[in-house]
Every structure is written in structure tokens, then in C-alpha cells.
Amino acid sequence: MKKTILSIAMAMMAMLPAAAQHNVTAKFARQLTTPRSYVCYRTADKMKIDGKLNEAAWQKAAETASFVDISGEDFPKPKYDTKARMLWDDEYLYVAAVLEEPNIVANLTQRDTIIYHDNDFEVFIDPDGDGQNYFEIENNARGVIFDLMLDRPYRSGGNFMIQWDCPGLKLAVSRDGTLNKQTDTDRSWTVEMAIPHKALTVNFANPLKAGNTWRLNFSRVQWLKKGGPEENWVWTPTGKIDMHNPDRWGFVQFSDKIVGQGTDTFRFPYQMEVYRLLWAMFYAQLDNKSKQGDYIRSVDRFFLTDAELATLPKGSEVKVEATAHSFRISISVPDEKVYYVVDENGKFTREAFIQRVVKNWMWMRIDKSQGAAKLKARFDLMKQCGISGVLFEGYDEETFRLCHEAGLEAHYWKWTMNRREVRETHPDWFAVNRKGESCYDKPAYVDYYRFLCPNHEGVAEYLAADYVKIANLPYVDGVHLDYARFPDIVLPVSLWKNYGIDQTRELPEYDYCYCDVCRAKFKAQTGRDPMDIKIPQEDQSWINFRLDGITRVINTITKALKADGKTVSSAVFPGPSMAKKMVRQDWGNWSLDAYYPMIYNGFYYEGPEWIGRSVKESVETINGRGKIYCGLMFPDIKDTFEAALDAAYDNGAAGVSFFDGPDDAYLRQLKAYLDKRGFVVK
């Protein structure tokens, strides 16, 4: 039995992405050690490139640490010591290295032959640190040069260009011993080179100047015995026998100080914990591709630990996009306002935040009892904390004016199909349920549910004229439609208990509209009386008839408002697929400026993730024809405030709108959240 369980466990492990089988930073720890660093000072001396390092500047320049095995810790210390030094001026980067060597040998004599077949010294330079279009200069103890340029590392299918000869390169070698003489004991050989700035100007924008940092590494290939194996000794280890990992090279920071006349403290150009995790994920992708034939497609499949994520700055987000042939990993660094990004080619970039512009709203009722001073203070705080506008139920000129003076938009929020005021003038306009009961005297659920029938002549025109009138009141920036629908044929599940009903099926007393006008119009279209339909919730023609009725009313209102130069929006049900079923509202086919789906997750016993799914459907349905502002019931999200906001924004909402809150403390929390996300509030 134990053997069976173990076999199953092993099989399941084999099915996991390679990264999942081990903490990624631990798995690739050898390739994630912190690279060595060096502060490179200016030289005021005129440098003679002769391999002898006699200039005072060279005597003052600090040596690097001794070279180590390319694979890093736990590998043998190199048999012979190697150290390098660097200087710079307005024309050149100067590199010098002293290589301890008891038997100086160099057989190759022709430029651009494969120099590492001899013992050699190699310089690798990636000026902008993006891991692409970098340079390599090698030489042996004769001073014979092999220089080339690579478009990207070999691990990513890189190509090398031997035809590139470093223009203006000066290089010399001196030997403390004799060349190719086996009978004596030598001591060392020294390399000195001057690399012109202008030679390293292919596809990068990080010139050699004070304050900038380049990525460099030095390598020494040593053949301790004829026929190998070769030894690879380097300044900063790559973690594997491959120098072509530019992300593993050392950091060289250029100082404006003259060498010997003061010092600078080295500072890494990146937040190294972010950089480290980014590259751990990069190596995990390569590993997974090698073993599974595919790239990891989502962050959760990396199985990042809490400890790994805790190394990132507060507010950082990790994102992964991948196909079978490419990937992009990004980690946001909020305090730098950039993303650290790496792709399948090992190209590393820092991309500035494209600041996302959002607008956030609150639904509010008119409350004149607060007084002007209190209202002004509230509006000022709302503006400071990231609220863009208010949707007011009702109208009061002073309230709208104070809202405007605080820099907030003010929109008039008014009911659409729910209009009890026409009971005296148009009693025939009210919707009728399948039982023959009219909202005029038998409203559904509550007394204020007095819904009109959208198919009666004059209803759409009456509503349009009313909205145009209120849109032209002082300080009104737009109108906001509410109850743009039929009565709820299905209530949100949390409300069923309030009315003692079970709406797992449609009930006739909540099924509208079966008035004489609707029945006659539908029969004229289809030849059928809707009262004869046995299962109305499954008859798509009858469902569409009612959806279209509401849509015609909304389109009439919208056309009138836009002709008058006004903006129009609406509170709508989640979905829009749910809206069709619950209230016969096909808002995905409306032509408004903005939509406010009321994604009140507590009404449906759902968590924040449901908010995201609903927003995503809404955004995809509208497809850029208008803005989606996610409606949130504040009391339902107090304990999951940021998670709810994340769900809305991360799925494409142009902003959020709060109902029944938030209070002052949560407004300030909203501001902190928006600042952390780097959003710009319009």
C-alpha cells in the first residue's frame, strides 16, 4: 500500500511544472548569487598601452577579488591567481589583468581564430545590461585578439558576429617569463587594453559616463594539461559552465572621481531581490520548456512561496504571459514606478509604469441636513482620496454646486421604468404580471415597485423628455439611469429569505409584462399569445421581445440626451448575462457612455473573485463602446477591500463606484491603494 501511495505521489510530482517541484530560488540558487561589483574611477594620466601598468593611475586602481571557478561556491579554488583592474576617461574604458602562470604558452597567431584553444583572458561587456547585443574580446599571451559581438546569449539561440573588429582597440601583453619555453618557470603575464567608448555603440543607450553602470565579466580559460579539460576561472561566477549569461555578470559603476582622490560607495542599479526572483522565474521557464516542452503560463504555476514573495517591495505584482514559444515575466517596483521585465530571449528591461487613468464614483442621496460646511469638507476629502464624481439620487442646486466646487462631477441619478408619479395621469402604462396583476395597484415585492411597460405608446418619449429636462439643471454633468428594467423575476439569492420565496424557478407573479399591448404586439410579430406559452422562461422569442422593449426605451432616452450634448450612464445588473435572466435587461446592446454593473457580491454569497469574473464579462461585452465602472456594495467589501478593488481593476474596470460608503477611514485607505497601484485619478 505504501509503495502504491509513493508511486502515485511521484507520478503527480512528475506532472507538475518543473518549477513546482522545488522552491524556484532554492532550485536555481547557484545561478542567483549576487554578482560582484566594482567602482571604476577616472584616470587623469595619459595611458600608454604596453602591458606594463607603470602609470600611477594603475597603481592606485583597486584590484578585483581573485577569480573563482565559473560554477561558483563549493568548486575548487583556481590553481593560479587572476585579478583585474579598471579605469576610464572620456575616450576609453581601460582594462588590465595580471594572470599568474608558471608556464606561459600561446600558439595561435592569427586574429579571430578561436583563442580559447590557448590559455586566454576574456572580457565580456553589456553596456545597457539588457542581455542583448553584447561584446566579447579575448586574447592570448601573444596579444592575439579574438573579438566578436552577439545578438543574444547562446541559450536563446544567439548568433555571433566574428566579422566585428573592435574599432580603435588598443591591446598589449607583457610577460614575466618566457613564451613557449617548457624548461623554465614563469611567473605571470599581464594584459592591458583600451576599449574606445565609440566602439560599443550598437543598439544601446547607456553611455560610459559618471553615474552609469555597465555589466562586465572577465574570464580566464586555462588548460592545466594538454587535451583538457579546460578550466574556467572568472571574476563573478555564472553558476554553470557558460559565460554567456549576461544577467550573471558583474556590475561596474563609473565614478567622476579621479582614481586615488576619494571613493564612492557602490550602489546596485536594481532592487536585487526583485531582480533575483525575476531571474529565478526565467530559469524555471527554461527548465520547464526543456522538460515539459512548454512554458509555464501563469504565476500560480511557479508555486512561489510566501518567503519568496516577502522579499519584494510592498505593493509589487508578479505577472506572467506565455505561449508555447514565448514568455514575458514582469515584477512591478512601485517606488521606482517601473516593471522589471524579462522575456524568453533573456532580454531584461525596466519599463516605466504606463500610468493608468481611472475614475471612481459614489452613489449618494441628497442630505441637506448636513449643512454646507460639512458637505464641503466631505466632498473635499472624497476628491483628495480618489473619487471623481457623485451620482446623486435627486437634485439640490446647492449640493450640486458644492460638489462641483470640490472638483467632482455631479450626475443626476433618477429611476427610469419605476415611475409611480404617472399613476394619476397614465394608469394604463404600468406593467402587468402573468397572473394579470398590474404594478399600478399590485406591485411586486415592495410598495414602491411601480414599473412601467416599455411597449406602451408615449412611455419612452415621456422618459426621454424628463431626462433632458433634468440634464439641463445647473451643475448637472450627466444623467444616470436606474431601474432601467422590468421588476426582478429572480431576486439575488440572499434576498429570498426576506420575502419567504424560492426562486429556483420563475414564478408568474414576478414575470412581466403581459399587458394587452405587449400581448397584441407579440402576437402580431409571432402569431402567438404569450399567455399560451407553457414555459415562458424557455421561449427565446418571448424573452427577446421583452429585452428589446427595454432596449428601445433606453435608446430613445440616450438619443435625446446625446442630441442635447449630455452624457448618460446607467446602473445595471451584473453580467450582462445575469441581467437578462434576472430583470430582462439586455444592457450589452445599449449605447451609453458608461455602465455601472452593481456587482454586489454579498447579495449572491460570493467572494471578491466573483467581482472579477463579472467585470471581465462586462468589459468584453461592451468591447470599448463605453466605460465599465464596477459597482461595489461597501458594507460587503469592508473586510476584503483591496481584494475587491483588485478584482475590479485587474479585469478591466475603468473605475469603481461605491454604494452605502465608504467612510472617511476607508476613503483614505482607497487613496493609499490608488497610490500603491500607481493609478492617476481623472
Image: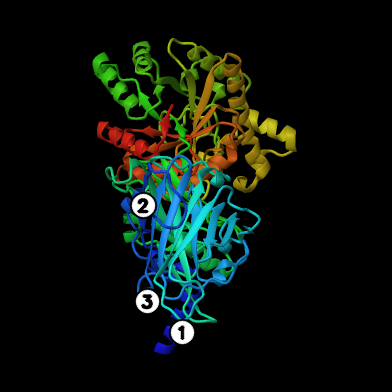
**Quadrant housing the N terminus:** bottom left
Badge 1: how crowded within 10 Å, few (<14), some, or many (20+)?
few
Residue 280 image offset from top left, x and y in percent:
43, 61
Whether residue 278 appears in this view of the structure is no
Question: Which label's residue is closer to the chain start, 1 or 3?
Answer: 1
Q: Camera-side residue: 370 or 218?
A: 218
In the rendered image, which residue does mark 1 sit on? Answer: 7
* Nearer the camera: disc 2 or disc 1: 2
Q: Return the mark for residue 58.
A: 2
Q: How is the image coloured?
A: rainbow
Residues at marks 2 and 1, CA–CA distance in whole angstroms: 63 Å
Identified at 26% across, 31% down, the residue is 664
Task: Give the image quarter of residue 235.
Answer: bottom left
Residue closest to the eye, 202 or 387: 202
Please give the label number shown on residue 104: none
Q: What amino acid type is highlighted by mark number 3?
A: Pro
Callout 2 amino acid: Trp
Dot 3 alpha-carbon crowd within 10 angstroms: few under 14, some 14 to 19, many 20 or more: few
Circle 1: residue type: Ser
Q: Which residue is mark 3?
A: 76
Q: Secondary structure at mark 3?
A: loop
Residue 17 on image: x %, y %: 49, 68
Position in image of residue 397 (x %, y %): 37, 11
